[in-house]
Image: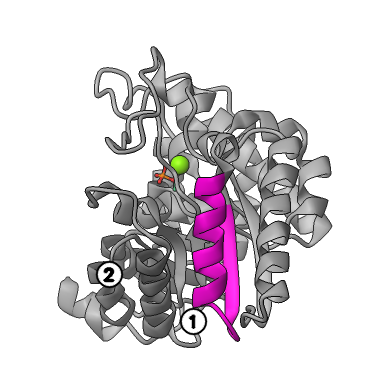
Amino acid sequence: QSAEFASQRDIPAVTTDGQRIALLTNAGLEVDLESLETTGAEGIGLFRTEFQFMVAEELPRLEAQTTLYRRVLDAAGPRPVTFRTLDVGGDKVLPYLDAGREENPALGRRAIRLGLDRPGLLRLQLRALLAAAGGRELRVMFPLIASVEEFRLARDLVDIEVDWARRRGKPLPAILRVGAMIEAPSLLWHLDALLPLTDFVSVGTNDLFQYMFAADRTNPLVSDRYDPLSPPALRALHAIQKACSETGTPVSVCGEMAGRPLEAFALITLGFTRLSAPPSGIGPVRRMVLSCDLSAARRALPNVLASTAGTVRSEIESLARKLNV
Ligand code: PEP
Ligand code: MG
């Protein structure tokens, strides 16, 4: 199988009826960069910057952050890289940060909340990203945005750092795009306000479903009780995809589900054309895309979405089988 995936590595992922699907990889450490070559990914759709912080014994300095980001951009060359700003707090504790203990870490001061409460931390990281991307394209996105106000505040910090660099005559990115992760269900009812503020969005399905189904993703007693291939989950994703296509906002899906062929089949049927997956998922998802007649799959979508069943996994499985996907 892996030989088959390797042989398809350089084949663009296009469905049998001609829809191009962009397959990107998730990464977080320098060792992951190799997977850009081994998987034939078209870029890094999610670079988890917190990994560098988690393996460090103290807060990585500006220099160390800049060096890593520069290496990532060098390795990617012309391929796009989307850096996700520090996503710690909650269960990802940095001993040197002293964020305080919380009763409900998943609902606590994690991700962008910590970044906004400690703007020095976020600004340092943005400074490193801007420096590393001098003369190139920089794509930055913020994790766990739950309100438009949070996105505005985070984006203001980017503007402050751009000004800071400009006043000092530092090289700036040739292109700067700022995006939000859609991981908090609250945003589903405020996409009309959020999307005009963003240059792109990326759906973090791991967290989005954790919060939608109120099921801790790290707790095996509950994490598997709810199916991403269920009407509520698929309807939520469909609403995001539709809203983005109406505003012309580029959207990708970067949760683990994007790396599982059946789930990815559902995602492209919903209309997503940009998936970012763990390296091991890219070959299997490419194979699925290459065999998929997307317009036939789309004809079945209304029925699947209208289902009153708790899960539609078996319906989607039989649809995939019927279409020889
Ligand atoms: C997600 O929540 O789906 C996501 C991609 O981010 P992480 O898994 O790093 O929380
Ligand atoms: Mg997340």
Please report the bounds of the magenta region as a residue range: 120-141
Tell us which disc is closer to us: 1 or 2: 2
- The type of residue carrying mark 2 is Glu
The front one of 202 and 132 is: 132
Task: Indicate which disc residue 79 carries.
Answer: 1
Q: Residue at x 42, y 77 (%)?
A: 70
Q: Rounded to the nearest whole Å, what is the CA distance between mark 1 and mark 2?
A: 16 Å
- Residue 7 vertical position relative to residue 276 in the rendered view, above or below: below
Q: Residue at x 75, y 38 (%)?
A: 148
Q: Is residue 3 left or right of residue 290?
A: left
Residue 124 drawn in magenta:
yes
Q: Residue at x 36, y 36 (%)?
A: 97
The x and y percentages for residue 254 are: 47, 54
Callout 1: helix, strand or loop? loop
Callout 2: helix, strand or loop? helix
The residue pinned by badge 2 equals 30
- Residue 285 vertical position relative to residue 312 in the rendered view, above or below: below
